[in-house]
Amino acid sequence: MIGASNLRTRQGSGIYQTGRERVVQILETALEILIEDGYQALTLREVARRCKVQIGAISYYYKSRGDLLQDVLNMVLAPYGENFKAIRHAKGLSPEEKLVKLITLLLEDIQTKKTTRLFPHLWMLANHDPFVAKAVDSIYLLERLTFASLIAKINPHLVDEERETLAVFISASIAGSTMFIGFDKPWSKGLPLYRAMTCRALLDLVRTITPDQLAAYGWRREDLEPEWRTPTILSDEEHAELIASVRAENALPEAAPKRAAG
């Protein structure tokens, strides 16, 4: 249960407490439909049936399935940002320990029914729905910002493009594990060993990778673009806003160096 007081929705979804409580019921029902039956089963009429109300009680808040999906995504994705923030600010932990904590969090998350069944739908919808595409891109950007900030502390010899590409590799490695160790998947019971191997392999990679090693496989720093920017479908303004929101809680330095020595 997410609770009406913690709900984050589109402007106008539900203003008063009673309205927010109704919206919570609608969103939790919509999420259940997505998880159990898939996106094709998500209709306003089906939500109304499961909530045991007239369809007008749903369409009062949501005029279309697209509007409803936006708030479902806001509800599902917002806690990830809070979890990333908590790890960045965890007291008494070294950057290496924070990295392991983040990897563990994500591996355990993909073992939940919600994540195993919902995210493949989102990856598919992102190919066609601009809002879903930007929502998914934003949450993975936040994830990679956390990885990149830890990588910078563990291995300061890497430059921006190298750090962020390494963050993409780590993120993709974990997300790609869903089909193997996700909820009710063949290797799901093997998480303890898989997690141990993943943490060891990724932490060692972050600690030890060097520009010279990368050069051995065809990467040349002289090919760096002068003003390299994180690849994203977000606009410049949207990307800057996301970065500013992270820096506002002191997770990142105001001006990270663009290039490292050596």
Image (cartoon, grey):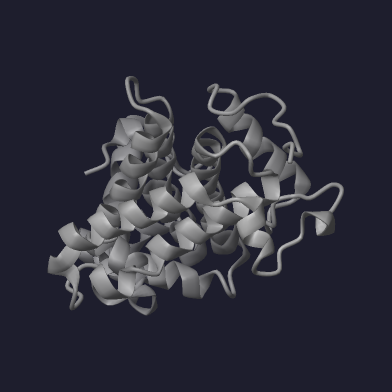
The picture quadrant where one finds residue 120 is bottom left
Asked if residue 97 is positioned above or below residue 77 in the image, the reply reads above
x%, y% of residue 248? 59, 23
Q: How many marks?
A: 0
Q: Quadrant of the N terminus?
A: top left
Residue drawn at 59 percent across, 75 percent down: 128
The picture quadrant where one finds residue 17 is top left
x%, y% of residue 46? 29, 71
Q: Nearer the viewer, residue 83 or 24?
A: 83
The picture quadrant where one finds residue 202 is bottom left
x%, y% of residue 23? 34, 46
Residue 53 seen from this side = no
Residue drawn at 75 percent across, 49 percent down: 229
Q: Quadrant of the C terminus?
A: top right
Asked if residue 93 is positioned above or below residue 175 in the image, the reply reads above
Residue drawn at 54 percent across, 57 percent down: 168
Residue 123 seen from this side = yes
Q: Nearer the viewer, residue 172 or 155?
A: 155
Residue drawn at 73 percent across, 32 percent down: 257
Q: Is residue 61 left or right of residue 108?
A: right
Q: Is residue 203 left or right of residue 191?
A: right
Q: Nearer the viewer, residue 48 or 142?
A: 142
